[in-house]
Image (cartoon, rainbow, N blue to C red):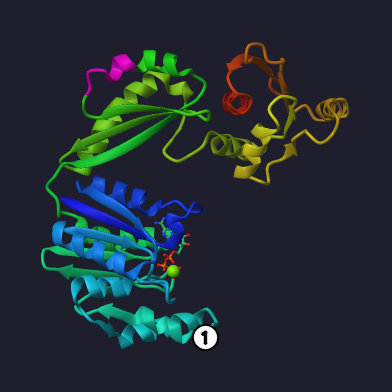
Amino acid sequence: MQADILATGSELVSPDRTDTNSLWITEQLNRVGIQVRRKLCIGDDLALVSQELARSLESVPLVFITGGLGPTEDDVTRSAIATASSRPLQHHQALEDDLRAKFLRFGRTMAENNVRQCMLPEGATALANPRGTAPGIHLVQEKSQLFALPGPPREMQPMFTELVMPHLAGLSNAPKMSRRILRVIGLGESTLDERISPLYKDCQNPEVGLLFSHLDIEIRLTSTGQTEEECNQLNESLALKFYAEVGSQIYGEGDTSLAEIVAKQLAKKEFRLFILDLACSGLAAQRLLECDATLQGSWAGSQSPDWLEKQLEAWLAADPSHCLLRIEASPAENEVRRFQFQLTGAIQQELVTALPGDRSIQDSRAAQCALDMLRKAV
Ligand code: ATP
Ligand code: MG
């Protein structure tokens, strides 16, 4: 079964915003065996949105549109659905009562503009939106179903999961699809591939892809099967083999980041850490603090290194449970810098790594090395 996704909003065809809704929706659809045939980003243009909606409604059984459900003149989705389906907009008093009650609860008076949000194309039903003002819309038009969802992801995603998914379950007999991502740190690209390729090279399901960046390596497992459980099972059995081979280098799964994992470990153990970073612009500390601004420690940089080192020695002498991470680098030779990471105090460890490439990429990789050292030590 196929679907089209239309993301509307003039900000999505400007350089300022990326359409992430269609990616998220595609992933949910793939899981239940629905493939996306095409997706479009269209500005707040009533004629164009109507035209593309009409084309989709004629040619695919499932159409999703996000954004443009707000109360203002530039929110064109309701009118576009009315035009594309040749159904007049009708006012629903029950929706208006709900909306007025919602405003009252927020302690605000409702602008008359908002009454527009209580209009639905004839025959459509509203999808409740407890997280915002705009209800979604569900319309069955001949052989197609259309779902209009709010633009903000925090409203759209729960509406999709709670109110759209139940309509989709069982619609498609096509194979289901499931993705699992294992995140690897501390192994080079070719080393990782050398070690794990014997485990997957003859395997077609799941498909395995490796995605490299200066933050980590993703091992992406994508399996298809008759049910979601079957897919998960296929992913699981291959993932277990990867864990057996390179488990200590797999720091997490899915959306998580290395800094997030390390920040949690540090917080849980109430670890006092000082980072004296003379090499990679304070990036390691910055990444930790972005995850948890309350972490204890001192994150060197603004003071002179000599002063700081004396200070840190004094701290370590006073309380040996403190830990100091010192990061230094040699000057670049042929675009290669040697980084030295040294943990002293409560934990003693040393790591030396030579990193080639561009300076900012070296800094980023070095910060990840430092975080990985902490992950293993703490
Ligand atoms: P509102 O009542 O907030 O106006 P709406 O349904 O009209 O809701 P839009 O005005 O289209 O939604 O979008 C509101 C905000 O939602 C946008 O500024 C943007 O931040 C976010 N947004 C909209 N569409 C997308 C998208 N496709 N991907 C990611 N974010 C989006
Ligand atoms: Mg809007």
Answer whether residue 131 is visible to the viewer in this image.
no
Extent of the magenta region: 197-203
Q: Quadrant of residue 84?
A: bottom left
Q: Quadrant of residue 264?
A: top right
User: Label 1 CB, ligand 1: below 8 Å?
Assistant: no
Q: Residue at x 60, y 38 (%)?
A: 263
Determine whether the residue tagged by mark 1 lies in a helix, strand or loop: loop
Give residue 109's position: percent from left, percent from top: 52, 86
Residue type at numbered disc 1:
Thr
Question: In the visual, does 95 lie left or right of 360?
Answer: left
Give residue 214's position: percent from left, percent from top: 52, 28
Give residue 218's position: percent from left, percent from top: 42, 30
Q: Quadrant of residue 325?
A: top right
Give residue 13's position: percent from left, percent from top: 42, 55
Q: Residue at x 39, y 84 (%)?
A: 115
Whereabouts is ligand 1, in terms of quadrant?
bottom left
In the rendered view, tell whether residue 292 sits above or below residue 325.
below
Q: Is residue 20 magenta?
A: no
301 or 6: nearer the eye? 6
Residue bearing the label numbered 1: 109
Answer whether residue 88 is visible to the viewer in this image.
yes
